[in-house]
Image (cartoon, grey):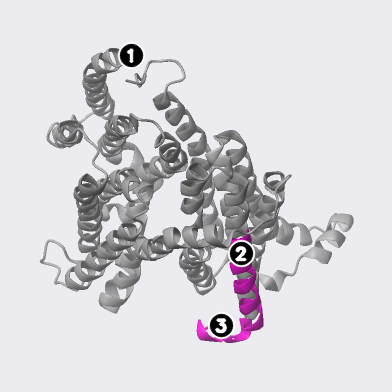
Amino acid sequence: MRNFGIFAPMNPFKKLAGQTAIYGLSSVLGRILGYLLVPLYTRVFLPAEYGTVSVFFAYAAFLTVILTYGMETAFFKFNESEQNKEKVFSTGMISLIFSSLLFLTLSSVFAQSIAGWIDYPDHPEYVSWFAWFLSLDALSKIPFARLRAENRAIRFVAINMTNILVNFGLNLFFLLFCPFALKQQSWPLINGFIQLIYRPDWGIAYIFISNLVASSLTLILLIPQFTGMKWKLDPKLLKTMLIYAFPLLFAGMAGMINETFDRLLLRYLLPKDIAAYQVGIYSACYKISILMTIFIQAYKYAAEPFFFAAAKEKDAKILYARIMDYFIIVVSFIFLATMVYLDDFIMRYLIGKNYWEGKAVIPILMMANLFLGVYYNLSIWYKLTSKTIWGALLSIFGAIITLVLNFWWIPLGTDHLVHGYLGSAWATFICYGSMMVISYLAGQHFFPVKYNLSRFFGYLGLAILLYTVSIYILPDSLFLRIIFHTFLLCVFAVVAYLIEKPRAITSR
């Protein structure tokens, strides 16, 4: 058997963990800076203006899926299976270039019509700028994927962080510095420069412009990935890649429904006098689950190319099962840490008191996102076996659950246990839980991996048990609560260490 011990030098677990940590750096920074921009936007713009920004970025979530149409994952698949990797890269890039140019052309020609259709007839320029921004982002997907496939995590993160920092910096420059500088009579040279590049009446346009500039710079920084590339399209390979990737398009679209549609449904299914209030409560509390999603996003960046590369090994399935064990340990620990420190730290410093009444949804949403992370782990079976239609079917199944349960539960009276945003939280929980279970069962049929279910339920059950203990044993003193909750975390860590250490030693 291959050396899969977690304490072995240069073993695959340490490699995956290290790359997850590196990818997580840019993910964490991006999320933090994204949070910092929200207070800026809500202080600079009127609610209607900020609403326009939200609408355009909501469209962006769906359009990004359409413009990449699963080619990023297809690249990973065929980059490992095809001997000529340059052919895979060039074929995928030419496909994305063609589709992006087509989208960009249509969006530019029909910008006025599109602006009218989405109810912004006075701003067709928003449509054009957004089309450019989305097209550039789509073109960067495969070069970024190539960096991940080549295990060049540091360069990936450096470019990604440059994008984040440039976008953040330009937002501060246009929305804070420029208006301030124009009021300073003692800065004639600076004022002259700013008057050349800044128009006060453009307002939210500078949010789009900042994204556009950052995306342009990102693609420029990725140019070295094209060095020495032979631009050659292989029609047969392209057809195979598209057949593989096309179901992922539907999976991505359905995934967007699972991730974002509940807030829209809350807005339109609840009575008007409480709808906006409940959406605000739910959205704020949903953000707490970011502590889980940051890790899962970073893990996805590292795991997808890792899993495809490991597929060549004869003991790959053993590796996948072991990785799942460690993944469960980490996400269970994150769940426990979030919940035991929720009242004393997380709610106190991340969310205002007016939103605390919605904290009942947090453990539900945290567990839902944990299920989603497990589903991402399990999904490797249909990607490796080229049965990506299952990815689409599972996501569509999840979207149907999301829609049905939200339509059913949201409008129920206030005396019901799952009314309003609580119904949306439970719908998310059931959606991701169902997708996880069905993916596991289907995977055992098409690509059986002997996942250790006793460890899955054991670690998850231990985290829930310790969280329950923290609810019923609650010292009055803040200092004692912190000590006790930290002790509970240590209990979980020690139990996991004692269980996994002998196993790691015997696998050397």
**Residue wearing tag 2:** 135
Image point 29% across, 43% down: which residue? Answer: 374
> For the residue marked with disc 1, what is the amino acid?
Arg
Rendered position, 283 above or below 152: below
The range drawn in magenta is 94-122
Q: Nearer the viewer, mark 2 or mark 3?
A: 2
Disc 2 on helix, strand or loop?
A: helix
**Residue wearing tag 1:** 508
The answer to which image quadrant residue 286 occupies is bottom left
> For the residue marked with disc 2, what is the amino acid?
Ser
Question: Where residue 426 sits: x, y (%)?
Answer: 20, 58
**Residue wearing tag 3:** 114
Image quarter where the N terminus lies is: top left
Image quarter where the C terminus lies is: top left
Whole-Å distance between the Cαs marked 1 and 2? 48 Å
Left or right position of 102 against 506: right
Q: Is residue 106 magenta?
A: yes
Left or right position of 101 against 412: right
